[in-house]
């Protein structure tokens, strides 16, 4: 939707514009209180107010203009006569220019909105309207010479060049013969597309120059003077001549027809006005603090006698030239001209509904009665069988907002998992995890894969992948954003390099091997006195038994490990990194001591980009909808769902984003520093005003109300007054589906959120011809409108009056008092005078064909009634209302449909005199939400089992609660339990995810390392099984001198090649469809094992590697398999590295046809130095379904270059 026109652009846009604008206002107020000069605040209307203008003309209307220059020069000092330039006889100095404005078509963003929306319905008394983004547009061209300049009405009303008209399809539809037949109206034109067709809204696209060539047609376009910027084509509608005459007929102030000689466009001056509104609380228009809109209202309704929905079409047409270009041809000769061609600039279809159909009040009431929490429907939750412990737990998970989803484990097994998004119906504690022994806060548990963020519910044996999914999503979003990725990389580099330099300098200073420039200069000045006396005292320059040359001899200093992983650097790196991060968070304004707060200039642009991206994601900006609404049933049609925002979820997402660019195996200290910088921005010390805000609560609405009113106004009332923005984010996620989101930082509580009110926006309130309207009568309720300043609003009506259709037999009814009559003594006795007629039904008594309001007579009637009832008892000289000129602003207020409101929360006192006819309330309470089952009630670690070289790593998250059989190297503590026995995934207890080589095996890999030993000469596997050729070589293998290089010190990427021998002749390839035997020898696992030295020099000769610290293996081509690396211990061979190839299969096995090639890469292998003649054993074990595994020992696979 286009940004609204505003006289005072705010200059702050984006997903967090509400918070930033509020912070700027508070900061400006504080600076002004401190005495600093500031620009004046723009005079913006307070929230809840609007200002109506009867017209909003531009400085110059569209057209061609000429500027003539004349200059007079005189001198008071010399007294010379005035010199006029140009001098007489010389040509005038002129400049021609054109003021450009739309004429035959509108720009794409000219229309801000329309009511009813495309395809939707409205009651028969509704007057459709268009909201224009440019408030000047209705008066950008001249459509009439009246009112005359200088007349009293000239400064009160202007005739616009745009009018909104409503038609039924049969009034505008042309027959096929009229379009393309022998009697086609367009036979003399040159259409760009043939055959000629009418659009869905009955327009025909023609060239402007072809309009005079249309047969049996007259058009106001014909007499318009061309402009250089005119469009070459336009969409026209063919209005029947008789109907056109009714739309431009003259009526007096009493509603009686007046004889006329030309079309009368004066009625349309009451049907366009401009509104200046405060846009606070509006999803689309709220991007500015205020908006000025042009409003064009139709005075023609849809069919009045329909008993079923009937489609109609609305056209925003140009009436430029209607008053001037008929050249005395009025009334139009219908025998000569059958149609009038009018230029349609915008059009849409809607449906006229019978009485009792959908309306705004009903929709808001339905939303109020259905207020609930964002989770599965209550019927679904209550339908779960809670007679078993598993049923109770599943019901609890649904209550917490979870849903079931498919989950495929890394090894290929397809199983189920539970998942939810950041919006939870229950309150999830934050932080969910406690701080770690390394000093990390519970909100900044770093992960390198997200797997360690999974949570196992042992009661039902289902994995909760909520936070793991959030982590992966954050990483994906970060990688997709090149600007963020670049800024994060620069920020990481700055922190790392600066911290390393500072840490090295500190260590070298402690060793006396380094001085800064300032220290060096200071020491030179301090040492000058000693240098000046050095030649006077030769004692002590060398030992007594030594010589002068000894002074140049120095003891060799100790080697200092200044690498990042060295203990000296690790001791101080985090402290220096935090100091660098603190400097980067400062602002470059002033004395450079203030923190960057998005309202000043950052010292680091990289930090600015990273912080902006992170805060946007905390506001859930650009998060795919399927992560916010995890199941369609959670947000059904016509529903209002409230939720809490889980900060643990957003923290996981942010950690995933910050994990990119990490090249460190151990603790990512730089990432921890960035987390600390973000935390210090959110929780500054000392506190600042206003404090940074982040969402904690909110709602999602899905309703036709959002579609019909995209700027549906949302007002948030807090129980205490603060400087914070009441709403943090307010946005329409999908207008076509009516989905709106609103995020807050307050929750319903004693000191927090009090109420949320939904109201129709001022510029999108619908208009009605009367309080009631049908084919028999029309009724008007006269609203309280004041010209006396500072009067409290009174939504009650003064009185009402009804007019009957003259074609009906019953006489006109007498005036009837309306509800909410003015207070006693405020109105004079008797009845106000009324116009004889304010509506034209037509000659058809049962199905009126004209259906138009008489704007002049109606406005005069309303103005007279308001003047009649305006007596002010306290001050008779100053009536509540006095105006002798009816105008468009008056019509705009009076024609407005009553305002309807939905209030959620504490009941707000209703304005005095409120009645259903003027303003309707629907008040409901906030839905009650409980605490989540996930709660940090305690973190329990079982006792450590034996000695461990991998302290703090957690067990697999998918483990059951029963005893786990672990390998001997995996003597580590199980993961912490959160709340009711939930177990967090591996990695909690340590700040990183366990590397792949230290993870316990699964499935076929959980058993022993070796099967039954094969005898020399035996086949690989059982008899008849497929045979494989296994070879291991580096990725840069030299065919002329093959083998694994040794002694280079360079990590190698090893290719493990597994290729099936003669696959077409291998057993297990018979085709069952051809009548053969079924496939045999399904492969469950293919394992290759070799020993690790693990620091034991006595094992070096039979071990290729000391240990494996790489990222883990990956398949090269056959993606039907997974390659896994696992450190395991064998009683006979000690520490080993097991490389397993496991099929991605729900059955856990793969037929031989899928196993023709299973090669994989084992990257970053640090090969031990060996003699090139050395041989190293490798054990190969294929595991087939139904057969005992056999292991083949091979000393020929690992080879070294012989040259």
Image (tube, rainbow, N blue to C red):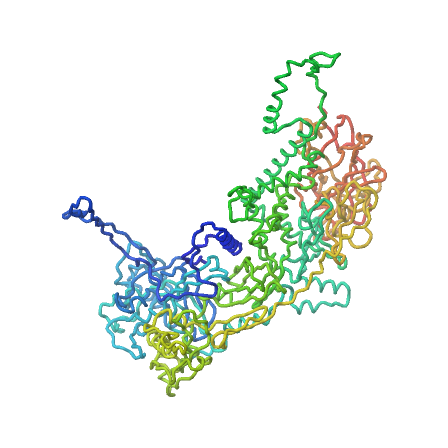
Question: Where does the image place residue 852, in percent across and percent down from the top left?
Answer: 36, 75
User: Looking at the image, can residue 533 be seen?
Assistant: yes
Q: Image quadrant of residue 897? A: bottom left
Residue 1069 visible in the current orientation = no
Decide which of 46, 456 is in the foreground and name it: 46
Q: Which of 827 and 930 lies nearest the eye of the viewer? A: 827
Left/right placement of residue 82 relative to residue 126 reads: left
Give the image location of residue 127, x and y in percent: 41, 72
Q: Residue at point 83% right, 37% down? A: 1133
Q: Is residue 98 above or below residue 360?
A: above
Q: Residue furthest right?
A: 1132
Residue 2 drawn at (x, y percent): 44, 57
In this rendering, would 297 be left or right of 335?
right
> How many numbered discs sit on the rendered protein?
0
Q: Residue 211: x, y in percent?
A: 29, 62
Q: Name the outermost residue toward the bottom.
A: 810
Q: Is residue 656 above or below residue 508?
A: below
Q: Residue furthest left?
A: 89
Quarter in which the C terminus is drawn: top right
Q: Is residue 796 left or right of residue 1042?
A: left
Res. 703 image quadrant: bottom right
**Relative to 645, does residue 271 appear above or below in the rendering?**
below
| Closer to us: 508 or 1104 | 508
């Amino acid at each position: 939707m286009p940004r609204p026109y505003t006289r005072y652009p705010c200059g702050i846009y984006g997903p967090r514009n509400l918070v930033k604008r509020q912070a700027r206002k508070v900061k400006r107020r504080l600076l002004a209180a401190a005495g600093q000069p500031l620009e004046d605040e723009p005079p913006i209307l307070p929230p809840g107010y609007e200002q109506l203008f009867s017209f909003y003309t531009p400085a110059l209307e569209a057209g061609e203009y000429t500027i003539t220059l004349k200059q007079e020069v005189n001198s008071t000092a010399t007294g010379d006569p005035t010199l006029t330039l140009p001098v007489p006889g010389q040509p005038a100095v002129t400049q021609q220019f054109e003021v450009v404005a739309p004429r035959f078509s509108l720009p794409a963003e000219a229309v801000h909105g329309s009511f009813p929306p495309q395809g939707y319905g409205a009651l028969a008394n509704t007057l459709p309207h268009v909201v224009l983004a440019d408030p000047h547009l209705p008066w950008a061209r001249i459509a009439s010479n009246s009112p005359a300049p200088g007349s009293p009405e000239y400064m009160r009303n202007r005739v616009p060049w745009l009018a909104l008209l409503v038609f039924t399809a049969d009034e505008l539809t042309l027959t096929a013969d009229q379009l393309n037949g022998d009697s086609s109206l367009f036979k003399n034109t040159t259409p760009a597309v043939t055959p000629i067709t009418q659009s869905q809204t009955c327009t025909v696209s023609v060239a402007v120059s072809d309009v005079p060539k249309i047969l049996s047609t007259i058009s106001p376009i014909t007499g318009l003077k061309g402009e250089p910027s005119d469009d070459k084509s336009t969409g026209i509608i063919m209005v029947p001549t008789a109907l056109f005459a009714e739309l431009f007929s003259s009526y007096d102030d009493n509603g009686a027809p007046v004889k006329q000689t030309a079309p009368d466009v004066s009625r349309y001056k009451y049907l366009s006005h401009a509104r200046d509104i405060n846009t606070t609380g509006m999803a689309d228009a709220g991007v500015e603090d205020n908006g000025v809109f042009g409003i064009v209202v139709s005075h023609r309704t849809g069919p009045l006698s329909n008993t079923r929905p009937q489609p109609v079409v609305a056209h925003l047409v140009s009436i430029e030239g209607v008053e001037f270009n008929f050249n005395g041809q009025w009334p139009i000769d219908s025998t000569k001209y059958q149609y009038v061609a009018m230029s349609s600039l915008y059009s849409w279809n809607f449906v006229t509904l019978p009485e009792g159909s959908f309306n705004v009040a009903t929709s808001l009431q339905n939303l109020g009665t259905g207020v609930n929490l964002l989770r599965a429907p209550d019927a679904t939750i209550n339908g779960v069988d809670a007679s078993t412990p598993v049923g109770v737990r599943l019901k609890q998970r649904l209550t917490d907002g979870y849903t079931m989803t498919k989950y495929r484990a890394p090894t290929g097994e397809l199983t189920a998992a539970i998942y939810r998004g950041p919006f939870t119906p229950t309150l999830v504690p934050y932080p969910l995890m406690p701080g770690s022994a390394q000093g990390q806060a519970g909100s900044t548990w770093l992960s390198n894969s997200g797997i360690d963020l999974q949570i196992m519910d042992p009661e039902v044996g289902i994995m909760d992948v909520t936070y793991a999914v959030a982590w992966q999503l954050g990483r994906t979003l970060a990688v997709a954003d090149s600007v963020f990725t670049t800024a994060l990389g620069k920020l990481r580099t700055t922190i790392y390099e600066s911290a390393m330099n500072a840490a090295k300098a500190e260590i070298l200073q402690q060793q006396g091997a380094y001085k800064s420039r300032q220290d060096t200069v200071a020491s030179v000045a301090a040492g000058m006195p000693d240098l000046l006396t050095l030649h006077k005292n030769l004692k002590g320059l060398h030992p007594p038994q030594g010589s002068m040359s000894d002074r140049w001899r120095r003891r060799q200093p100790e080697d200092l490990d200044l690498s990042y992983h060295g203990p000296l650097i690790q001791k101080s790196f985090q402290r220096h990194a935090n100091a660098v991060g603190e400097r980067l968070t400062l602002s470059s304004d002033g004395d450079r001591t203030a923190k960057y707060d998005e309202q000043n200039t950052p010292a680091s642009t990289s930090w600015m980009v990273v912080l902006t991206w992170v805060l946007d994601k905390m506001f859930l900006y650009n998060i795919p909808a399927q992560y916010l609404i995890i199941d369609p049933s959670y947000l059904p049609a016509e529903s209002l769902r409230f939720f809490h925002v889980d900060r643990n979820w957003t923290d996981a997402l942010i950690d995933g984003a910050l994990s990119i660019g990490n090249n460190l195996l151990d603790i990512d200290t730089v990432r921890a520093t960035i987390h600390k910088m973000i935390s210090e921005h959110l929780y500054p010390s000392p506190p600042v005003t206003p404090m940074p805000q982040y969402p904690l609560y909110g709602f999602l609405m899905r309703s036709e109300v959002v579609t019909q009113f995209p700027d549906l106004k949302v007002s948030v009332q807090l129980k205490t007054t603060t400087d914070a923005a009441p709403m943090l984010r307010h946005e329409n996620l999908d207008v076509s589906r009516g989905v709106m989101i609103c995020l807050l930082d307050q929750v319903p509580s004693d000191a927090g959120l009090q109420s949320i009110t939904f109201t129709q926006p001022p510029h999108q309130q619908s208009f009605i011809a009367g309080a009631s309207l049908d084919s028999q009568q029309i009724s008007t309720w006269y609203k309280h409108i004041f010209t006396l300043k500072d009067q409290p609003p009174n939504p009650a009506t003064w009185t009402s009056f009804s007019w009957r259709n003259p074609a009906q037999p019953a006489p006109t009814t007498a005036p009837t008092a309306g509800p909410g009559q003015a207070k006693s003594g405020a109105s004079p006795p008797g009845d106000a005078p009324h116009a004889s007629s304010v509506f034209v039904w037509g000659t058809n008594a049962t199905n009126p064909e004209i259906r138009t309001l008489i704007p002049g007579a109606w406005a005069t009637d309303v103005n007279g009634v308001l003047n009649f009832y305006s007596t002010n008892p306290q001050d008779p000289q100053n009536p509540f209302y006095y105006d002798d000129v009816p105008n468009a602003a008056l019509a705009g207020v009076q024609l407005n449909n009553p305002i309807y409101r939905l209030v959620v929360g504490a009941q707000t006192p209703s304005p005095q005199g409120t009645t259903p006819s003027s303003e309707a309330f629907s008040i409901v309470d906030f839905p009650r939400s409980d605490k989540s089952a996930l709660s940090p009630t305690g973190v329990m670690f079982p006792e450590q089992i034996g000695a461990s070289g991998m302290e703090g790593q957690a067990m697999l998250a998918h483990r059951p609660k029963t005893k786990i059989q672990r390998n001997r190297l995996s003597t580590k503590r199980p993961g912490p339990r959160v709340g009711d026995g939930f177990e967090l995934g591996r990695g909690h207890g340590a700040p990183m995810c366990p590397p792949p080589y230290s993870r316990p095996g699964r499935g076929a890999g959980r058993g022993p390392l070796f099967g039954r030993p094969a005898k020399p000469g035996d086949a690989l596997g059982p008899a008849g099984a497929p045979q494989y050729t296994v070879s291991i070589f580096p990725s840069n293998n030299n065919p002329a001198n093959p083998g694994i290089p040794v002694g280079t010190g360079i990590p190698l990427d090893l290719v493990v090649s597994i290729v099936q021998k003669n696959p077409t002749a291998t057993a297990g390839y018979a085709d069952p469809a051809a009548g053969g035997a079924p496939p045999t020898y399904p492969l469950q696992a293919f394992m290759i094992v070799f020993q690790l030295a693990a620091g034991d020099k006595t094992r070096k000769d039979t071990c290729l590697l000391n240990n494996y610290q790489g990222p883990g293996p990956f398949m090269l081509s056959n993606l039907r398999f997974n390659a896994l690396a696992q450190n395991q211990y064998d009683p006979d061979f000690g520490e080993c590295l097991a490389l397993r190839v496991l099929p991605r299969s729900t059955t856990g096995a793969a037929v031989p046809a899928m196993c023709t090639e299973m090669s994989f890469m084992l990257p970053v292998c640090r090969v031990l130095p060996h003699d090139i003649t050395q041989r190293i054993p490798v054990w190969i074990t294929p595991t087939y379904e139904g057969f005992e595994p056999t292991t083949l020992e091979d000393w020929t696979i690992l080879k070294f270059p012989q040259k």
